[in-house]
């Protein structure tokens, strides 16, 4: 797959996942789609999320995991590629580390 096509697919999946999560998730936490990791062959995509407040992270992760089938239907309906990559979700540890560094710098 070309690098340009991969970037376009990742950006489209990121945008569609964010819209789906915003529409389906409750107002108890802020779930942000930080990036999408796409396998080199384009068959697997991992949606990386960040959740605030931190205490709601596991609940938000579980919610998205349970709704991956609906998310995949939404993405396949709005993303005109075939086949649509297998979707998975993960917690963006890099974003969590960045937030910790920001907190430490603010408190020093």
Image (spheres, helix red, strand yellow):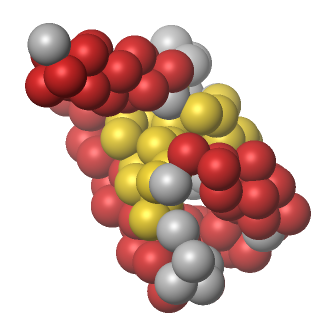
Q: Residue 37, can we see it?
A: no
The spot of residue 43 in percent (x, y) is 64, 31
Where is residue 1? Give x, y as percent: 39, 20
The tally of labels here is 0
Task: Give the residue at the far right of this rendering.
Answer: 66
Height in image: 42 above or below 34? Answer: above
Position of 23 with respect to 100 (left or right) is right
Q: Residue at x 64, y 34 (%)?
A: 90
Residue found at x 33% / y 61%: 15
Question: How far across and down, in percent of the image, does residue 100 sit?
Answer: 35, 21
What residue sits 70% from the left and 41% below the top?
Answer: 88
Answer yes or no: is residue 43 visible: yes
Left/right placement of residue 65 relative to residue 95 reads: right
Above or below, 1 relative to 5 = above
* Above or below, 33 relative to 105: below
Residues 61 and 107: in front is 107
- Nearest to the observer: residue 44 or residue 66: 66
- In the image: residue 89, left or right of residue 38: right
Q: Quadrant of residue 6?
A: top left
Q: Seen from this angle, which residue lies furthest front?
A: 108
Q: Report which quarter residue 96 is drawn in.
A: top left
Image quarter hosting the C terminus? top left
Among the 4 quarters of the image, the one containing residue 99: top left
Residue at 60% of width from left, 84% of height from top? 26
Picture layout, residue 37 above or below residue 74:
above
């Amino acid at each position: 797959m070309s690098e340009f096509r991969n970037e376009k697919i990742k950006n489209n999946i990121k945008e569609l996942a964010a819209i789906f999560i915003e529409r389906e998730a409750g107002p108890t936490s802020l779930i942000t789609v930080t990036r999408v990791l796409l396998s080199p062959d384009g068959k697997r995509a991992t949606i990386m999320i960040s959740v605030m407040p931190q205490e709601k992270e596991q609940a938000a992760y579980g919610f998205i995991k349970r709704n991956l089938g609906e998310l995949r239907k939404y993405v396949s309906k709005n993303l005109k590629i075939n086949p649509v990559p297998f979707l998975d979700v993960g917690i963006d540890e890099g974003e969590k580390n960045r937030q910790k560094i920001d907190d430490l710098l603010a408190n020093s």
